[in-house]
Amino acid sequence: AQSVTQLGSHVSVSEGALVLLRCNYSSSVPPYLFWYVQYPNQGLQLLLKYTSAATLVKGINGFEAEFKKSETSFHLTKPSAHMSDAAEYFCAVSELGSGNTGKLIFGQGTTLQVKP
Amino acid sequence: KAGVTQTPRYLIKTRGQQVTLSCSPISGHRSVSWYQQTPGQGLQFLFEYFSETQRNKGNFPGRFSGRQFSNSRSEMNVSTLELGDSALYLCASSLAGPPTDTQYFGPGTRLTVL
């Protein structure tokens, strides 16, 4: 079974600083990888998705992630943090199930705090 | 286009009761997945439906069940509620389902079991 590890359950940055949220996955086949963001009392919003078209994936709100097969990583970055980026971030990988369909396997999440 | 809607948003039940949660997917989406989110276990897959058929199921007891209607709306049911069933239940819809299609999530139903 596939798994996702997010390093650091809590990350704190200053407004304007670089945001780096780490994600490592285990997969024996090329995966579909996702980053979602969850604001308090809300569902998950898709930030970006990797589907093997390009190793550097650009998402919404200035976020991007780089797929590194040799490191089995898919870290999320943003050059300059904004107060509105404070939220919980989830990395996920798609796992194939029956009938060539699947499910998402999520990491434990990383809470991003942005200090003024 | 309207997003995924879930009703009710909040529920309070007592142990032993049963509960039904509803999910309306984005128009045109035929796949609906359900996830349970708790502080201890994180986000865990419950099941996925496509065209009224359950295609995938997670590792949850039989007390957790679901169904999908011809209009793609889905319901999940939890019988004989336990304290540990307190969680945020999230529904996600997509055109044809994971792994290739992006799943769009609803706001969730917060279930509290007393």
Image (spheres, rainbow, N blue to C red):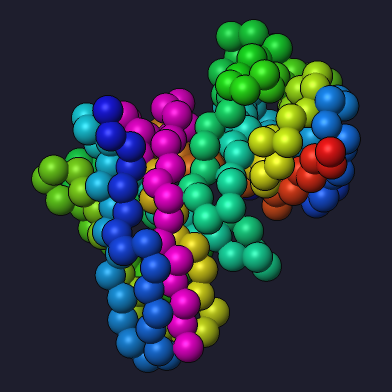
Report the residue at 15% width, 51% height from top.
B69
Residue A57: percent from left, percent from top:
65, 15
Picture quarter containing residue A37? top right
The magenta stretch is B93-114
Query: From what the image shows, is residue A41 above or below residue A93?
Result: below
Whether the magenta-drawn stretch holds residue B5 is answered as no
Query: From what the image shows, is residue B43 above or below residue B77?
Result: above
Question: What residue occupies the far left of the structure in this picture?
Answer: B70
Query: Could you tell me if residue A69 is visible in this image?
Result: no
Picture quarter containing residue B41? bottom right
Q: Quadrant of the N terminus of chain B?
A: top left
Q: Is B31 situated left or right of A48 in this image?
A: left
Residue B101: percent from left, percent from top:
42, 27
Q: Nearer the viewer, residue B9 or A105?
A: B9
Picture quarter containing residue A78? top right
Residue B98: percent from left, percent from top:
43, 34
Q: Nearer the viewer, residue A86 or B64?
A: A86
Query: Could you tell me if residue A44 is visible in this image?
Result: yes
Whether the magenta-drawn stretch holds residue B106 is answered as yes
Q: Nearer the viewer, residue B13 or B35?
A: B13
Report the residue at 58% width, 45% height from top.
A38
Residue B92: percent from left, percent from top:
40, 44
How many marks the image carries: the answer is 0
